[in-house]
Image (cartoon, rainbow, N blue to C red):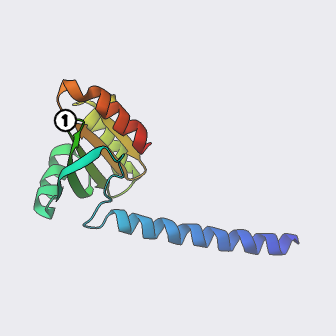
Amino acid sequence: MTQKNRVRFLALWAICLSACFQYNTRAYGSENPPVSDMPSEWRVLSDIQVQSDQVKAMSRKLGADIGSVRNTVYDVKGKRVQINVIVTQDMLNAEKLMTTLRSMKSEQALLQKGLIVYEFVGPNDVLSVIAEGREHLK
């Protein structure tokens, strides 16, 4: 490949990556955050898309621009675990949200993957289940 063709290829590649990033950002910032893909023994008890007015209130309270939130409650071997899937507007807000949540919760109850922050909620007797779920989502 000549130098000129290599430059053209890299320019096209950069355009494709930019388009993919913009599409994924819009998709995650939409009204429906992705459902957590959990192991088969994690049985869904309830799955709620949080309404936009509540998301706005959460954004103000947590000090980060949040696009959408999904609350899913699971039964795992007789124990109840909730996962809040929180989709932020951009990486800066994802970091802001993680900083705020870290001040309120254990690091083991949080996981950030790009614009998405997973918050695990449950009593102390589900810590091992939360660790399993967190590891599965990594």
Q: Position of residue 105 (x, y in %)?
A: 24, 30
Quadrant of image for the C terminus: top left
The residue that mark 1 highlights is 78
Quadrant of image for the N terminus: bottom right
Instruction: Say which of 120 and 74 sits in front.
Output: 74
The residue sitting at the right extreme is 2
Q: Position of residue 103 (x, y in %)?
A: 25, 30
**How many marks overall?**
1
The residue under the point 11% across, 61% down is 53
Q: Position of residue 52 (x, y in %)?
A: 15, 63
Q: Is residue 122 visible?
A: yes
Q: Position of residue 16 (x, y in %)?
A: 59, 72
Q: Is residue 106 visible?
A: no
Hey, what amino acid is under mark 1?
Gly
Q: Quadrant of residue 119?
A: top left
Q: Is residue 11 left or right of residue 116?
A: right
Q: Is residue 90 left or right of residue 50?
A: right
